[in-house]
Amino acid sequence: MNKKKCLAVALGLLLCAGLAGCGDSSKKADAPKASKEKVVTTTEVATQGQKKDWKIAVVVKDSSNGWFARMDQGVKQYAADTGINAYQKGPASTDAAQQVQVIQDVINQGINALCVVPVDPAACDPVLKEARDKGIVVITHEGSSCKNVDYDLEAFNNAGYGAFIMDKLQESMGGKGVYTTMVAHLTNASQNEWANGAVAQQQSKYAGLQLLDNPKRVESDNNSEKAYQVAKEVMKSHPEVKGFVGTSSMDTPGVARAINELGLKGKTFVVGTGMPNECRSLIKDGSLSYITLWDPAEAGYAMCVMARQILEGKKITDGTDLGLKSYNKLIQSKENPTLFMGAGWIAINKDNVDNYNF
């Protein structure tokens, strides 16, 4: 009996020690997870508000796209930081009709605010009007041509971002050569404004560069494989092309693959919007000289902040602070009073790509 009792006591002590060890291990494991989820740095302005029972839906172009997976992290962090029911939805692929259906579904779910990154602004406008008619606050991002909105929030001045892309492309091309532009769709408002801004910058500052006469602009359908195929066709048909302006985050990696496959690394260049993790190897091997971008997680978070401010009766004006570094002093467009811009563009190359993990 004594031996059995001793054994029982020993086992009990071991079990307690084991449970204590699991508890400690759990606490240690939780800490990095929490810090990992904080993808957006904010000030207290971002989380200020009177009520917590608002419902904010964010509808993106494509729920399977890595860009919007990053945006979803920002939306989820906003929900965690504030206790507000904010969530993201999107179609399974970049399709305007499917996105309209998703929007239709969420506006019938008792939401207070709707934030949309439109595939096709014109296609979205009727359902956005329906949302506003129901008293829902409507905010767009990459949708400056949408009419039925309270506000459109951009990470920056679109023409200025296009000029920034061109500055990096001409640097890569050595200041001379023929280039063309690529967008996801010719109907995409923001991406075409970026491409137009790039062309305007070239025409005003870089006489050594020339826009390809035909095609001046090609479409990737927001698909890396399509961008790859289209870029190969352009380079085979027009061997004089030495540069591409990419606007969709799928353009740059697709074009870079084509450049690599055709043995044109160091001779033909692409600069444009991209995701660091998707483009890292292409940047490091020289197929891709620069990617330009803003942080979609910040954009998703910022839309939610703006939505709450409007719901609580705050007026959005020139200089409004949303409590995020890239959106701490909004600039109101003089031409379009519903358009507000931050200052969030960055350029990434082989020297700093490892500083970004998304």
Image (cartoon, rainbow, N blue to C red):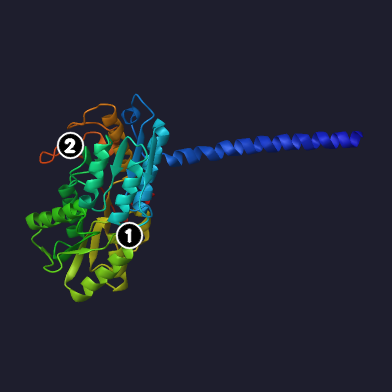
Q: Is residue 24 left or right of residue 118?
A: right
x, y percent for residue 305: 31, 34
Within 10 Å of disc 1 (Cα), the crowding (few <14, some 14-19, many 20+) is many
Relative to the observer, which residue lies in front, 289 or 320? 320
Q: Name the residue beneath numbered marker 2.
A: 331
x, y percent for residue 3: 90, 36
Give the quarter of the figure containing the N terminus: top right
Residue 305, visible in the rendered structure? yes
* Residue 330: quadrant of the picture: top left
Q: What residue is drawn where x is 66% and y is 34%?
A: 20
x, y percent for residue 156: 21, 44
Q: Is residue 11 left or right of residue 157?
A: right
Mark 1 → mark 2, Cα distance in angstroms:
33 Å
Residue 342, visible in the rendered structure? no
Find numbered disc 1 in the image and state the secondary structure of the residue it sits on: helix
Q: What residue is drawn where x is 33% and y is 66%?
A: 225
Find numbered disc 2 in the image and state the secondary structure of the residue it sits on: strand
Name of the residue lying farthest toward the right: 1
Please, what is the three-letter code of the amino acid marked with disc 1? Ile
* Residue 183: quadrant of the picture: bottom left
Of tags 1 and 2, which is closer to the observer? 2
* Residue 271: quadrant of the picture: bottom left
Answer with mark 1 or mark 2, whichever residue precedes in sequence. 1
Please, what is the three-letter code of the amino acid marked with disc 2? Ile
x, y percent for residue 297: 34, 44
Q: Is residue 167 above or below residue 22?
A: below
Q: Is residue 220 left or right of residue 179?
A: right
Which disc is residue 258 wearing? Answer: none
Which disc is residue 283 wearing? Answer: 1
Verify CB contact (< 8 Å) between mark 1 and mark 2: no
Relative to the observer, which residue lies in front, 191 or 107? 107
